[in-house]
Image (spheres, rainbow, N blue to C red):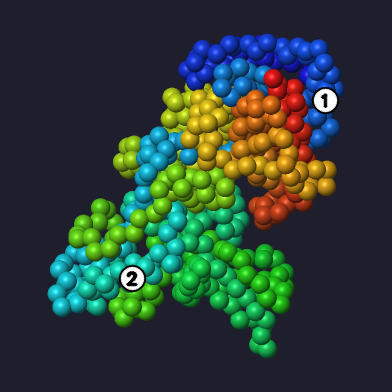
């Protein structure tokens, strides 16, 4: 690669302090690889500069690749350039949560009573208390309603309260996104179905029949907390309005086909959960009054408790499916465990930024959330590789990362490819990121991070077009082809 040695020299100087902390005093300047006799295949490998130029992405490309065990830096491009990390942020969130909460941590959702249960009557209030569980769903609430009946409750003399004070209320993760995107919901201490509601439509003789429900594998209870109205217009496709505690949506008639469905975000997840629990309780013969919000620390006797899977299980799913709400709930729970009241998502992200600096040596990276959805987050390839090397190719993070398939020129998965990749992807409009570990055919293990972004082009996308802007899909495909080409280069060039 043109100028390769000088890049390594610069990286060694700029990341010296980070390397001392995270890489155990590894060499700060890598040795220029010298092809051995007979390694003619290495001499034929295309240079990184040529691969980047051929991709024609525009914007900026940055990467660092290092020996995963020793931290020896092998090759770089713009290693200390802060770039949008997109969902690669979730790897940092996972490390932050593991360090703070522990792999065995479980989120708890409780039903609490403020009075005794006498002859089936709860003489006091029933409180549904959220513990920040990002995976709570309708099936879980149905199980809790059945358990409440088994606890002897048939009716409630007092109020039915809902408490979500475990986490601050976040109306949406990123305000710059369109209102209707299901991956940008509200987040609070009581979440349900990833804080999404299922919208379904079917053409009928009178127009369209629409339904809004909280469906899961077993149940699909209808809800009143979210309403949809079909209107005659072309654009916008959706509109949203907060109407007295109800999520009021409209959809353009001309945008609907014969039938279909999609998930829409929920902006009041605690009330959504309360309504669904009322429905599940009613199916058990327990009628509850309309829910009222309870603030502060919930007090009372625990009648029913639902526990989530262990944190390590949730994180593996997070890094596989990349659910934004899950990342935010887990990240804010970790921040709350460190300092109590965190106040806002921004404040929680700041705590994670500070933790990253102290635990990985990162100095130029910052986060505005825990999912990577917000465009204000920045991460350098050098900082990301520092974190990966510190963890090691056989550490806790490596076991959580998903395998990334390598593909042929037609996009088909190459079965049995000798190069193995376990990594986290990240995608925003005109932003593509990938970070993790590579195992070369000879067993050499590499740690790498790649960030590619055309921020000028991204900034030019209108808010109404951000779900699928023109050119973003082809740009992303080109970025992924470049990422694979670089990985194959490294596996060939730096294999023993």
Q: Position of residue 46 (x, y in %)?
A: 82, 25
Q: Indicate the quadrant containing the C terminus: top left, top right, bottom left or bottom right.
A: top right
Helix, strand or loop at label 1? It is loop
Q: Residue furthest bottom?
A: 205
The image quarter in which residue 255 lies: bottom right
Query: Who's the residue at 84% across and 19% down the image?
Result: 40
Give the label on residue 276, or none: none
Q: Position of residue 310 (x, y in %)?
A: 40, 48
Classify mark 1: residues with Cα within 10 Å, few (<14), some (14-19) or many (20+): some
Write down the residue under mark 2: 145
Query: Who's the residue at 59% across and 43% down the image?
Result: 402
Classify mark 2: residues with Cα within 10 Å, few (<14), some (14-19) or many (20+): many
Query: Who's the residue at 24% across and 78% down the image?
Result: 154
Q: Mark 1 and mark 2 in contact? Answer it, CB < 8 Å.
A: no
Q: Position of residue 494 (x, y in %)?
A: 71, 21
Helix, strand or loop at label 2? It is helix
Query: Who's the residue at 21% across and 65% down the image?
Result: 113
Task: Examine the rendered structure and indicate whether residue 361 appears above or below residue 117.
Answer: above
Write down the residue under mark 1: 46
The Cα atoms of the two marked residues, 1 and 2, are separated by 62 Å
Q: Position of residue 73 (x, y in %)?
A: 63, 18
Does residue 204 appear to the left or right of 93 in the view shown?
A: right
């Amino acid at each position: 690669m043109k100028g390769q040695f000088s890049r390594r020299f610069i990286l060694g100087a700029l990341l010296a302090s980070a390397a001392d902390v995270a890489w155990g005093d590894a060499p700060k300047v890598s040795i220029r690889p010298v092809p051995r006799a007979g390694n003619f295949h290495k001499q034929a490998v295309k240079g990184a500069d040529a691969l980047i130029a051929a991709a024609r992405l525009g914007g900026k490309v940055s990467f660092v690749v290092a020996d995963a065990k020793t931290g020896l830096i092998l090759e770089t491009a713009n290693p200390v350039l802060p770039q949008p990390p997109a969902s690669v942020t979730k790897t940092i969130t996972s490390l932050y949560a593991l360090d703070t909460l522990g792999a065995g941590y479980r989120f708890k959702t409780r039903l609490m009573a403020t009075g005794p249960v006498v002859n089936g009557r709860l003489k006091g209030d029933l409180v549904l208390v959220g513990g920040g569980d990002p995976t709570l769903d309708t099936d879980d609430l149905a199980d809790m309603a059945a358990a409440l009946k088994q606890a002897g409750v048939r009716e409630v003399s007092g109020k039915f309260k809902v408490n979500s004070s475990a986490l601050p209320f976040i109306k949406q993760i990123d305000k710059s996104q369109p209102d209707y995107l299901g991956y940008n919901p509200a987040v609070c201490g009581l979440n349900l179905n990833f804080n999404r509601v299922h919208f379904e439509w079917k053409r009928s003789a009178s127009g369209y029949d629409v339904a809004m429900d909280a469906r899961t594998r077993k149940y699909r209870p209808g809800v009143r907390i979210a309403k949809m109205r079909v209107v005659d217009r072309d654009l916008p496709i959706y509109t949203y309005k907060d109407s007295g505690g109800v999520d009021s949506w409209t959809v353009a008639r001309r945008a609907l086909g014969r039938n279909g469905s999609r998930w829409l975000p929920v902006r009041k997840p605690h009330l959504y959960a309360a309504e669904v629990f009322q429905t599940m309780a009613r199916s058990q013969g327990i009628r509850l009054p309309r829910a009222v919000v309870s603030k502060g620390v919930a007090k009372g006797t625990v009648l029913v408790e639902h526990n989530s899977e262990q944190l390590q299980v949730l994180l593996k799913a997070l890094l596989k499916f990349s659910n934004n709400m899950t990342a935010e709930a887990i990240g804010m729970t970790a921040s709350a465990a460190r300092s109590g009241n965190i106040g806002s998502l921004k404040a929680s992200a700041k705590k994670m930024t500070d933790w990253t600096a102290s635990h990985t040596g990162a100095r130029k990276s910052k986060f505005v959330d825990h999912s990577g959805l917000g465009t204000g987050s920045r991460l350098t390839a050098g900082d990301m590789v520092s974190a990966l090397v510190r963890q090691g190719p056989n550490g806790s993070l490596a076991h959580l990362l998903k395998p990334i398939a390598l593909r042929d020129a037609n996009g088909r998965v190459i079965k049995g490819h000798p190069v193995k990749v376990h990594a986290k992807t990240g995608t925003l409009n005109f932003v593509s990121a990938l970070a993790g570990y590579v195992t070369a055919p000879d067993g050499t293990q590499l740690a790498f991070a790649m960030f590619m972004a055309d921020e000028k082009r991204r900034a030019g996308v209108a808010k109404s077009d951000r779900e699928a802007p023109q050119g973003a899909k082809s740009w992303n495909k080109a970025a992924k082809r470049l990422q694979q080409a670089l990985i194959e280069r490294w596996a060939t060039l730096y294999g023993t």
